[in-house]
Image: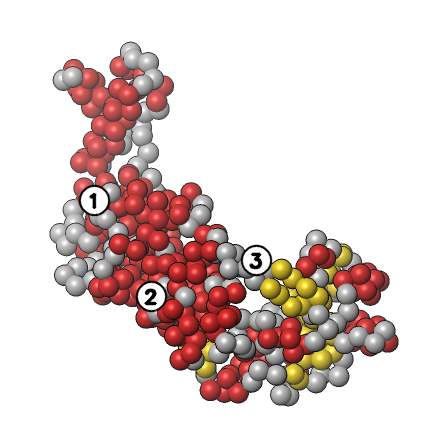
Amino acid sequence: MEIPTALQPVLRLLTPIAEDFTAAGHRLYLVGGVVRDIAFGVSRDLSDLDLTTDARPDFISSVLEPHASVLWTQGERFGTIGAQIEGKAVEITTHRTEIYASDTRKPEVNFGDSLDVDLSRRDFTINAMAISIPDGEFFDPHGGLSHVDQKLLVTPIDPVVSFSDDPLRMLRAARFLPRFGLAPDPKLQEAAAGLKDRLDVVSRERISAELDRLFEVSAPRLGFDFLLEVGLLPWAVPALRGCSEEDLVVSAALASSPGNPDVRRAGLLYMLSQADRFESVQQALAQLRYSVEVQNRSARLLQELEAVLIVDASIQDVRRLVSSLGISITQNEPNQLVSDLRQLASNVSAAVPGVSFDGSFFDVLYEAVAVVGTLHYKSALSGHEVMELLDAPAGPAIGQAKMMLRDHWVQTGASSAESARECLLSWSRDL
């Protein structure tokens, strides 16, 4: 494989380090995503570089230290030494062999001396290629370059062994398929279908991180189709395990539809219970250890989706949504949540039989904004003012009063302090 011109500065940066390795009888190889993307002809950021060597961590550290502005040794017991060199993050790892126990994906790591063995422990052949530094010799013991040409995703060793050792590799497969437009090797697909329950040994945080990487792929459909076909989708997202096959097909389609990760994440969970949608979506994402912020963003999108699917939307419908979400919409400041809602509504309309979306809700919303310049609910009276007017302490009654004022704004659009006081006093007399 010809080394592209863009990589030459990297080779020059690493050459003095590699020469120190060579002088001591060791070899140094560039590995990982940089080599893979070169093979695919994909341009990438070259600020993070992964290398491997037969040298041990103490030697790696001694060689890197004179060249580095910063040295990281936190990964030394796993064979990895990191350094900042001329603005680039360089990590060098000793060749490794690994032994996996059946109840975990965390291996017992042993240092090795063979590049071929080290490359065989990697997830896919497209990630198991190396370039020798400084001479630029290309190493491909598992045929990764031919699989690049064939557009085929293959494991370096038997996929049953590979996926049994590290089940997260099955989700990585789902990400690489659409990212590079690949097809899964039939043996890989068969192994994933037979080992889906092994995903239970993977931490939920690692699963959600891998799903997020899939959501970020520009067109992730191949990945979600793979998860659907091998039966991995409900194992990755436990909340979907009670869904029918038809519902899972819809979930995969919505997770692959246009939009940012928030929209796709909400789409994936659209088929959950509509009766208590906010809570069910929160719980589904909490199971995957998503932050409360992420849980709420997706849950709010789905909770308010029905409002934007109203064909004959009224200004009251628009005000209710704006007030419940606590958002401000102006002509000069488009709101991300509103944009996400519109995209999600469009996706659901396209993927779910019997659901239609013609944009009338947003027509009313934007018309209202065009007339008054802004659409935003903010209580005209503070909580303290409400307590003074009602001569009541803080408590449930004050909360009810504030909800009533919001409902008043939804119905009338009036938001002046005078209007709010009149409404509040009238309400209190009727109690």
| Residue 132, image x, y percentages | 71, 80
Above or below, 55 relative to 331: below
User: In the rendered structure, which disc, 1 or 3, sits on the residue that comes first in sequence?
Assistant: 3
Say which element carries label 2. Answer: loop
Dot 1 corresponds to which residue?
Answer: 275
Q: Nearer the viewer, residue 45 or 165?
A: 165
| Residue 114, image x, y percentages | 70, 76
Location of residue 107 (image quadrant): bottom right
Residue in view at x 13 percent, y 52 percent: 312
What's the residue type where badge 1 is placed?
Ala
Q: Nearer the viewer, residue 190 or 63?
A: 190
Location of residue 89 (image quadrant): bottom right
From this viewpoint, is residue 183 visible?
A: no
| Residue 33, image x, y percentages | 58, 72
Front of the two marks 1 and 3: 3
Location of the N terminus by quadrant is bottom right
Mark 1: few, some, or many residues within 10 Å (few <14, many ≥20)? few
Residue in view at x 83 percent, y 62 percent: 62
Here the colouring is secondary structure
| Residue 370, image x, y percentages | 27, 50
Residue with the most extreme top position: 391
Whole-number angstrom distance, CA of label 1 to CA of label 3: 40 Å
Residue with the most extreme front position: 102
Dot 3 corresponds to which residue?
Answer: 106
Location of the C terminus by quadrant is top left
What's the residue type where badge 3 is placed?
Lys
Above or below, 305 relative to 427: below
Dot 2 corresponds to which residue?
Answer: 231
Q: Which mark is residue 254?
A: none
